[in-house]
Image (cartoon, rainbow, N blue to C red):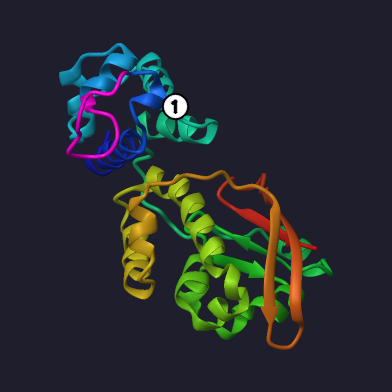
Amino acid sequence: MTLSRQKELADFLRSRRERLTPKAVGLPPAGRRRTPGLRREEVAQLAGIGVDWYVRLEQGRSVSPSAATIDALARALKLSEIEQAHLRALAQAPDARLFTPETVPETLKAVVESLNQPAYVTGRLWDVLAWNAAAEDIFAFGRLAPGDRNTLITVLTKPRSRALFGEHWAEEARRMVAQFRASHDLWAGDPAFQALLARLREGCPDFAGWWDAHDVRAATAGRKRMTHPEKGALSLRYATFQSNDDPGLKLVIYC
């Protein structure tokens, strides 16, 4: 496991431990606590593992937890299904390759362009790699510099997108950050992902707090409410689809 992956695993465990109370896990109160959440020894006790070993995990030191240990920690920390899947992924050996921008197959581009509904394709870094005219009418990706065509950069740092989402902006931005967290941690330490995080920290004052909360959410279908300067109030349902050509490519369609 790389040092970056070890740190993300440690930070995730710590964040989940600190949000729990003794009462929530069936432990008796143990007097005044200087810090929020459970103590490390309490998590180790609940998971049935050694305290020293758990401390090593939270310190980001080089350890290799078994699948059984990961599952025990997930139960002890009362992780959701998506959080448990994320914990398992963090504990696995990472892909040693560096990130390289994806290429959208011509057939997929043609499908996107043929749709009447707004649609676009994103990659692992959430760069917008292809989009159609209907998506351009709403999101104006073509008006952005190539280096800014990234859904996180657009929504979190661009005044136009903030105005587009209006009162729903913070909810939408935080949802995106939690979903990206699941992708990022598998590429922790990669220069491209580090550069993106640096831009988000610099361009969005709220980002650091959301990121440090280490919330993780699954990519699900939903609805976005926007106020377009020309089209007025919009309430669009959306769904995402993974490409068979490259699992890193996601097709997003609105209706």
Count of numbered badges drawn on the protein: 1
| Quarter of the figure that contains the N terminus | top left
Q: Is residue 237 visible?
A: yes
Q: Is residue 141 left or right of residue 50?
A: right
Who is closer to the viewer here, 188 or 76?
Answer: 76
Q: Which residue is mark 1?
A: 78
Instruction: Please tell me in which quadrant of the rendered image residue 232 appears.
Output: bottom right
* Residue depicted at x 59% and y 68%: 168
Q: Is residue 100 above or below residue 199?
A: above
52 relative position to 211: left or right: left
Front-most of residues 39 and 104? 39
Q: Which residues are the magenta region?
A: 28-40
Q: Residue at x 60, y 47 (%)?
A: 219
x then y, percent, for residue 78: 44, 27
Percent coordinates x, y for residue 57 in the rendering: 23, 29
Main SS of the magenta part reads loop
Lateral position of residue 11 relative to residue 88, left or right: left
Q: Is residue 32 magenta?
A: yes
Residue drawn at (17%, 32%) of the image: 61
Three-letter amino acid code at the position of disc 1: Lys
Q: Secondary structure at mark 1?
A: loop
